[in-house]
Image (spheres, helix red, strand yellow):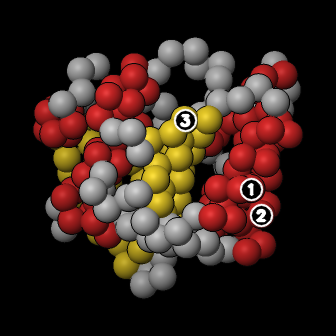
């Protein structure tokens, strides 16, 4: 398997990318998004608003009008938006959550709590129902002994563990439905050149 094939395999799956901070999760996700622009009709991106500036937001907006961003400061509005997206998500749509690890950081400031609570709402909803149409991608920054990972494993069809050593990204790809694991190494500069994204 190569990274191009992986970008196709994720279609219509629940995917979680597990990794430490600065491991390359976001860059890999952008690659997946751009490689599937022709496949997806709608792309919904949720992110915490306290990250006031993500360079890749403006970059993605220039690339495609299919991409919509959500970072409202009102939990009720955000919950209604997410519920509506989940209800209408079809097999040519992508729902992407960045910075999912904020689920547990409820002691932080109020606007972070809003994103944390929307993550809890999403996780409980999808944990019960398990499967929606479409593709759902989560970036999860984990810590040791993180109990949420067990829930993530239940929810996911594909679990991608990512580790970065300088400019080499190492992936361990676990297809949970087939109980099959594959390893893959990617050059970070190659990914950046493919998505034409300047750090």
Position of the N terminus by quadrant: bottom left
Give 186 or 27, whichever is nearer the viewer. 27
Q: How many marks?
A: 3
Give x and y (percent) for residue 134.
Answer: 50, 67
Point out which mark residue 125 bears: 2
Which label number is shown at residue 69? 3
Q: Quadrant of the C terminus?
A: top left
Task: Locate residue 89: give its quadrant.
Answer: bottom right
**Viewer-closest of 116 and 81:** 81
- Nearer to us in this view, 21 or 91: 91
- Tell me the crowding category of disc 2: few under 14, some 14 to 19, or many 20 or more residues within 10 angstroms, Cα based: some
Answer with left or right where residue 189 lies relative to residue 101: left
Q: Sequence-wise, which precedes: disc 1 or disc 2?
A: 1
Q: Residue furthest bottom?
A: 178
Q: Secondary structure at mark 1?
A: helix
Q: Classify 10 Å Cα crowding around label 1: few (below 14), some (14-19), many (20 and above).
A: some
């Amino acid at each position: 398997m190569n990274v191009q094939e992986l970008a196709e395999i994720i279609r219509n799956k629940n995917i979680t990318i597990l990794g430490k901070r600065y491991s390359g999760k976001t860059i890999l996700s952008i690659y997946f998004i751009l490689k599937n622009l022709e496949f997806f009709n709608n792309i919904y991106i949720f992110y915490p608003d306290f990250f006031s500036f993500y360079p890749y937001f403006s970059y993605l907006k220039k690339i495609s009008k299919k991409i919509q961003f959500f970072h409202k400061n009102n939990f009720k509005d955000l919950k209604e938006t997410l519920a509506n997206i989940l209800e209408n998500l079809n097999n040519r749509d992508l729902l992407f959550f960045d910075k999912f690890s904020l689920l547990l950081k409820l002691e932080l400031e109020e606007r972070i709590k809003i994103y944390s609570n929307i993550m809890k709402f999403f996780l409980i909803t999808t944990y019960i129902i398990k499967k929606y149409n479409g593709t759902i991608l989560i970036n999860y920054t984990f810590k040791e002994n993180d109990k949420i990972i067990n829930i993530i494993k239940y929810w996911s069809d594909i679990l991608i563990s990512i580790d970065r050593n300088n400019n080499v990204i190492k992936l361990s790809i676990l297809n949970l439905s087939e109980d099959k694991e594959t390893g893959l190494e990617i050059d970070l500069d190659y990914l950046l050149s493919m998505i034409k994204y300047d750090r």
